Image (cartoon, rainbow, N blue to C red):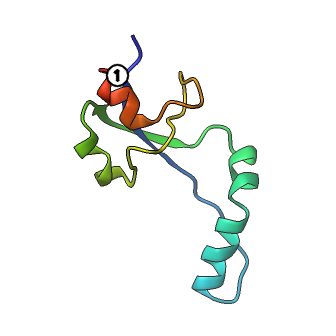
């Protein structure tokens, strides 16, 4: 049976901009392109998620949809309520 896991993906890009704020905004605006151009980002596995209380430390909430082996409609909280 599939379970929920916390994984961080890290992308480092070079952005041409006049200020730090502009560089951050441009990177955010181009995030989809960045992901498409780098299919092999740095990854860090954190832990299996077994309780809704663990979500906030990763910036997630129970109403979010998980990636991976998911039906596309069941939320993280619903998976946790039924044991994974």
For the residue pair 1 and 77, the one nearer the viewer reads as 77
For this orientation, the residue located farthest to the bottom is 18
Please identify the quarter of the rendering in which residue 50 is found: top left
Packing grade of label 1 (10 A; few <14, some 14-19, many >=20) is some
User: Is 29 drawn above or below residue 69 in the view shown?
Assistant: below
Q: Is residue 84 left or right of residue 70?
A: left
- Classify the position of the N terminus by image quarter: top left
Q: Position of residue 9 (x, y in %)?
A: 50, 45
Taking the spot 62% from the left edge, 38% from the top edge, the residue there is: 40
Q: Give the residue number, with chain letter if any, for mark 1.
A: 84
For the residue pair 55 and 71, the one nearer the viewer reads as 71
Taking the spot 41% from the left edge, 16% from the top edge, the residue there is: 2
Q: Is residue 61 left or right of residue 67?
A: left
Please identify the quarter of the rendering in which residue 19 is found: bottom right
Q: Is residue 47 left or right of residue 32?
A: left
- Classify the position of the C terminus by image quarter: top left
For the residue pair 74 and 2, the one nearer the viewer reads as 74
Please identify the quarter of the rendering in which residue 39 is found: top right
Q: Secondary structure at mark 1?
A: loop
Q: Position of residue 42 (x, y in %)?
A: 51, 43
For this orientation, the residue located farthest to the top is 1
User: Is 31 drawn above or below residue 82 in the view shown?
Assistant: below
Q: Position of residue 17 (x, y in %)?
A: 71, 82
Q: Position of residue 7 (x, y in %)?
A: 42, 39
């Amino acid at each position: 049976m599939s379970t929920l896991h916390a994984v961080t993906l890290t992308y480092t890009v070079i952005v041409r901009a006049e200020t730090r704020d502009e560089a951050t905004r441009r990177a955010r605006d181009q995030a989809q392109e960045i992901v498409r151009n780098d299919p092999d980002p740095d990854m860090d596995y954190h832990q299996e998620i077994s309780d809704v209380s663990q979500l906030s430390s990763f910036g997630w909430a129970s109403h979010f949809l998980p990636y991976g082996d998911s039906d596309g409609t069941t939320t993280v909280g619903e998976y946790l309520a039924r044991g994974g």
